[in-house]
Each structure stands twice: as structure tokens, then as C-alpha cells.
Image (tube, grey):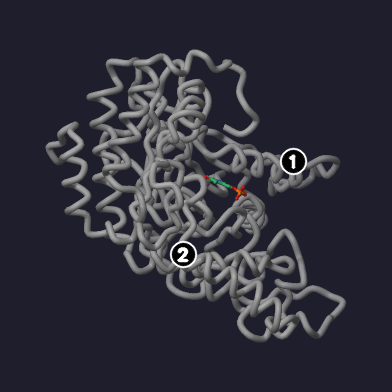
Amino acid sequence: MTNFSPSLDFAQQLDSQDPLASFRDQFVITDPDLIYLDGNSLGRLPKAAAERAKHIVNEEWGQDLIRGWNKGWWEAPQRVGDNIGGLIGAAPGQTLVSDTVSLNLFKLAASALMLQPNRKRVITDTFNFPSDLYILQGIKNLLSSGGRVDPHDRGGSYRDHTILRIGATDDDITPDLAALETAMDEDTALLTLSHVVFKSGYLYDMRRITDLAHAKGALVLWDLSHSVGSVPVRLDECNADFAIGCTYKYLNGGPGAPGFLYVNKKIQDKLTSPIWGWWGQKYPFDFSLDYEPTPGTRRFLVGTQPMISLLTMEAALEPTLNAGMDAIRAKSILMTDYASFLTDTWLAPLGFSLGSPRDSAQRGSHISIRHADGYRVNRALIEEMNVIPDFRAPDNIRLGFSSLYTSFTEIWQGFDRIKRVVEEKRHEKYPKQKLTVT
Ligand SMILES: *Cc1c(COP(=O)(O)O)cnc(C)c1O
């Protein structure tokens, strides 16, 4: 780890040595005083995306009208999917842009379970994003036996699915890997985890965990929402079966930009989507009355995709593709190491503790800092210090660092303002009652 200093000079020196520093100019930054540490929830607006959005609305929608579908809109889910594939180690033909992260999890997890009717167990962890857990619960509810129990069925196909959630080790930062390893058995159909977990930022070893599951014949689905665009991912090399991910976080695709899904070539044509729609039909413009799935991942499309946000997101990928994942990761590690140093040096004496792994090999691009009054500190930061982090219950202030536009000076200023809030007790005037969106 670099020998850090808490001086402003030092932060400025890190900026002057930053090979990605110029990328900040490719983003719309209207308030230079704003310390934006929430790019892991909603990335900043790339100038290229703003330009593209204007073009899509005025030229493509405004002038081309329905002809747009034959000028690249129809193929966009696969074309943009392959671009994202380049960031996650996926050869072409395996990544598809579609719908939301939650819906993509539904489609892929349900199809994984339908493929293996004799295996009834899904394993995940308590670190997973709640929507992921709800989707799994909904699938279990849908597939559970109800009135179908057949006492003569010795194949076990009437058994209900179960969901096992692996917990945390004592520190509440790291999942209990030993428990995960022990739990994996011949009844496990699917293991699904967030590659970088949303609260502590813990980063799973994709290859090791995928191998563990495969050794028991289970399939593996990775949620890349917090790793795509921040951590190099090698899906093909790790032989992952499925992945899903988000484009409005580190990929800067814009609010509500569609998600993506990845299905390994080896299993694509064995899978059935649980939702049959005309965009996943083999010859949609034959308007045949019966469904026949199209080959490959496209069978996981359902209906018309949101072209304005999909094509805007396509342009938003440019800075990430140009910077390359290795440079992005190198800066990200330096930023999270630096932020951990400032947490220890300035904030620990004020009642904060680091809620993220100290080893950068086990950490994504955000850190959590924990404080008993975290919610109110977060509110004071937003309302009077022009700092935007976010808050994740019970006590985590989450700070996200984007290699493309976060500067070291900005991190220094952010921590300086956090320190001032607590030193000056500014948070104490806010109610403990939380606002709807934190
Ligand atoms: C952000 C995020 C989501 C978001 O799901 P949407 O369906 O796009 O709202 C899902 N899973 C994880 C792990 C996330 O971080």
C-alpha cells in the first residue's frame, strides 16, 4: 500500500500522477464544489450520452420514426450487450441488454431451476441485494408444489424448492465462506451471489466459488451490478453459467437504463425462458400463433425494449471502453485504499469504523464507513455540505468512487467535510426519522 499523507498537497499530487485524470472532462459537471460519491448508485452523465440522447430523440425518433427499427434498433440489445461483454470477459453472443436487473434475475434463475427439476436448493447469502432475495422468494413461491404432490413420484420432483442464505462472519463485512463451502451439495441447483456486495463492498473470488459450485454439479449466477465497470470480470475464463448486471451505476447509462444478462454459450439452447414474448420468438414478424424460442440469448427478451435509454446507454459506455478495465481497477484500488486511510486517520477518533475489507483484493470500488449516528451524518452531508454519499441501514454511509471522474482532491474534500459535520455536531439537529429514499 502507498504511504499516504492526510495533506491536501498529497491529494493534489495523486491527481497529477493519475493517468485517467483527463476522463473527468468527458462528464457533465455543473457544480465543481459538489463532492459526488454516489456513482455506484447513479453514475454521472457522460457528455457523449447527452449528445446521443438529443440525436435519438430529434433525428432517430423525430425523423426516422418506425424506420428506426431497421436502422439498428432491433439488433441493439445484442450489439450493446456484446460491448458490455467486452468489459466482463464474455465472448460475443452471450451478453444481452434487456429489462431490469431484477427481471433478468427472475428469467435466468427460474430457467436454471426448470433445467434441473431434481435439484431443489438455491444458495445465496445475506449480503445480497434485497431485490435479488425477493425475486428468489417469488420464484420459490411460483414453483412450489401447491396441490401437485404425487405420493408415487419417487423422482422427488414434487419437493418444494428451498433457499439457503449464508450469513456473515463476525465482522459483518465478510461472508462466511466456510459455511458456503459446506452448504453446497448435490441437491443445489443454483448458487447466486452479488460479485461485489452492495453494503460492505466485499468482492468474491469468482473463479474459486464457481469451481466449488460446479464440483457439486450446481449452476452459478453472478450479479455484477457493483462490479461491471469497476472491477475486471472474466466470466468465460471462470466458466460462469449466468450473470446479470446494472448499467446506471459504474457504467453511467442513466436513470432506469436497462440491465443486461449473460448466458454461457454451452447452456444457452437448453434453457427455456419463464416469460414467452414475441421478442424472444424465432420469427416474430411471421406472427405465428405458437411460441418457438429463438436460438441463443435473445430468447430472454420479452417485449419492446426502451430504445431511448438503451441507445443513450450505448454512448455512455464510451469512456469506460476507452479507459479499459485494468486502468480503472488500478485507480479504484488507490482511491479505496486512500479513503480507508482517511477513515482511520480522521474519522476513527470521531466514532467511525471502516465497514469494508482492508485487503483491496477483496474489495470493489465503494467503502462503507459506520457510525452510530450515520443516518443523520449522511443527511447533514447532503443538505449543508454539498457532499452526496448514500446511507444503507443500519449504520453505513456508503462512499462510491468512480475511476473515470472522481479525483483524489474530491475524496480529500469529502472526508474533510464529513469530519467537520461530526466535529461541529451539525448532524444533531436532524430528526432520526428517515426520509423515503436514503
Ligand atoms: C442496483 C442493484 C440492483 C438493481 O435492480 P433493478 O432491477 O435495476 O432495480 C439489483 N441487484 C443488485 C445487486 C444491485 O446492486
Whether residue 126 is situated above or below residue 370 in the rendered picture: below
Image location (x, y in percent) of residue 416 = 31, 29
162, 336: nearer the viewer: 336
Q: Quadrant of residue 182?
A: top left
30, 221: nearer the viewer: 30
* Picture residue at 76% right of the left edge, 45% below the top: 142
Q: Does residue 326 appear left or right of residue 214 in this picture?
A: left
Q: Quadrant of residue 399?
A: top left
157, 344: nearer the viewer: 344
* Picture residue at 37% right of the left edge, 45% below the top: 401
Is the C-beta of the residue carrying label 1 under 8 Å from the nearest atom of ligand 1? Answer: no
Whether residue 356 is situated above or below residue 186 in the rendered picture: above
Identity of the amino acid at label 1? Asn
Whether residue 295 is situated above or below residue 387 in the rendered picture: below
Q: Can I make out residue 204 in this image?
A: no
Q: Which quarter of the figure is the C terminus placed in?
A: top right
Identity of the amino acid at label 2? Lys
Q: Which quarter of the figure is the N terminus placed in?
A: top left
Q: Does residue 308 appear left or right of residue 91 in this picture?
A: right
Residue lying farthest left? 3
Give neighbour class at mark 1: few <14, some 14-19, many 20+ (Cα, 10 Å).
some
* Picture residue at 19% right of the left edge, 31% below the top: 6
Report the number of discs: 2
Describe the element under mark 2 as helix, strand or loop: helix
Residue corresponding to mark 1: 141
Is the C-beta of the residue carrying label 2 under 8 Å from the nearest atom of ligand 1? Answer: no
* Picture residue at 74% right of the left edge, 67% below the top: 303
Whether residue 418 is situated above or below residue 109 in the rendered picture: above
Give neighbour class at mark 2: few <14, some 14-19, many 20+ (Cα, 10 Å).
some
Q: Which mark is residue 47?
A: 2
Q: Nearer the viewer, mark 1 or mark 2?
A: 2
Q: Quadrant of residue 54?
A: bottom right
